[in-house]
Amino acid sequence: MGRAAKYQQITDWIHNRIAAGELSGGDRLESENEISALFGISRQTVRHALGNLEQEGILTRVQGSGTYVKGGVAAGGPGPLSQTVTIISTYVDGYIFPRILQAMVKTLEKSGYSAKIMFTNNHIETERRFLERLLAEGSRDPLIVEPVMSALPNPNLVYYRRLQSAGIPILFFHSYYPELSIPHVSMNDVQVGRIAAEYLLAQGHTRIGGIFKADDGQGRRRYAGFVEAMRVAGAAVREERISWIDTQEMRDSLQLSPRILKRLAQCSACICYNDELAHIVTGLCEEQGIRIPEDLSLISVDNSELARLNAVPLTSVAHPLEVLGEKVAENMLQMIRTPGFDATYEFDPQLEIRASVARYGEI
């Protein structure tokens, strides 16, 4: 085995231990002699590998003490928090994200903070890479995160716990990982589903279907609110009227048609997860000669420009957009100033009524 391959063994070994949580900021590494004996290689190769990791900002050497994972107390203390807030969002080009992120950044900048934004595209592996990088660099940036597929088990929770242990303030927006004790700023999504269903029920609809996202926590909570409203009203929730979709199906919208339309066949109304999905459903219905709202009433979520520009303007639960972005930034600033501050805040939803819902039996 060549020297380069032996050197890579050591760097991979250290990277993997950090990623797995075996090593955290401030942990002392084995001595050069111990690593040399473990791998059966020369101290010169070990020293070269550790030196390169030090240049990458992953390790730091303390004379007379040893080599430490960067960012911890033993390596000189965690130090003050950075004046840069790292924001990890799912998307850059969604119909609501630019306005939320712009408001977030603007509010942070007013208080003297800059922002660094990264996008996961709702991919768990991308989220993992970002978090590993922050840990490896010993980043002291406060962290604002939109969770990735928050309704599913997530293997990245260990990284959030390690960042918390390093004293990094973390605030989720839009959703949260229920397994973590980390605050969030979002809509009250249970109430979103409830008021959407209550409005349809008030218009005389009882055969109400729904299309919800299965891999986002918002979808699960909106469904829970829908079910609660239906049960209070004594209306049946029938599984055959409910469709669950995931992020990939949203991207491949044309493949939704057969399953979605079959489940809506016996419905007089439908709650859609968001405006984007309602816009897709409008197109599918138009292709099949299903009239909105005459044959099917639609109600959606976000009250975006897409809701106003839809072929039939959508009745939609309003998303706070810029106000939410400002609140996220304000609460993060408060977390920085007052460690232990409970930054969780959920916005009560409001309904914007347009033409996509008809009173049952009047058309």
Image (spheres, grey):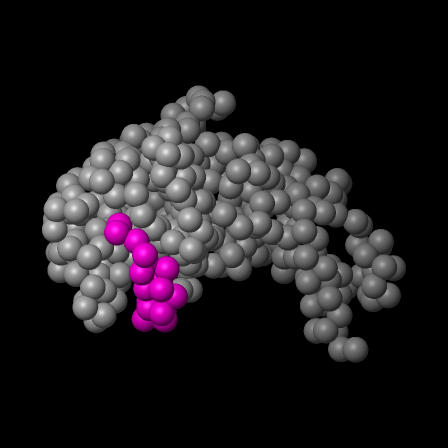
Quadrant where the N terminus sits is bottom right
Most foreground residue, 93 or 255: 255
Q: Is residue 62 magenta?
A: no
Residue located 12% across and 46% down the image: 362
Q: Position of residue 209 (x, y in %)?
A: 34, 50
Give the magenta-colored segment's residue range.
252-269
How many numbered dots are placed on residues in this image? Answer: 0
Residue found 34% across the figure and 44% down from its top: 115
The picture places residue 139, in percent across and down from the top left corner, at 51, 44
| Residue appearing at x 45%, y 24% in the figure | 342
Q: Extreme front residue here? A: 361
Picture quadrant where residue 55 is located: bottom right
Instruction: Give x and y (percent) for residue 169.
Output: 48, 33
Q: Residue at x 35, y 50 (%)?
A: 210
Q: Is residue 104 above or below residue 5?
A: above
Image-based side of 323 in relation to 74, left or right: left
User: Most prominent secondary structure in the magenta stretch?
Assistant: helix
Q: Position of residue 178 (x, y in %)?
A: 53, 38
In the image, 64 versus 155, the foreground residue is 155
Q: Quadrant of residue 10?
A: bottom right
Q: Is residue 70 left or right of residue 7?
A: left
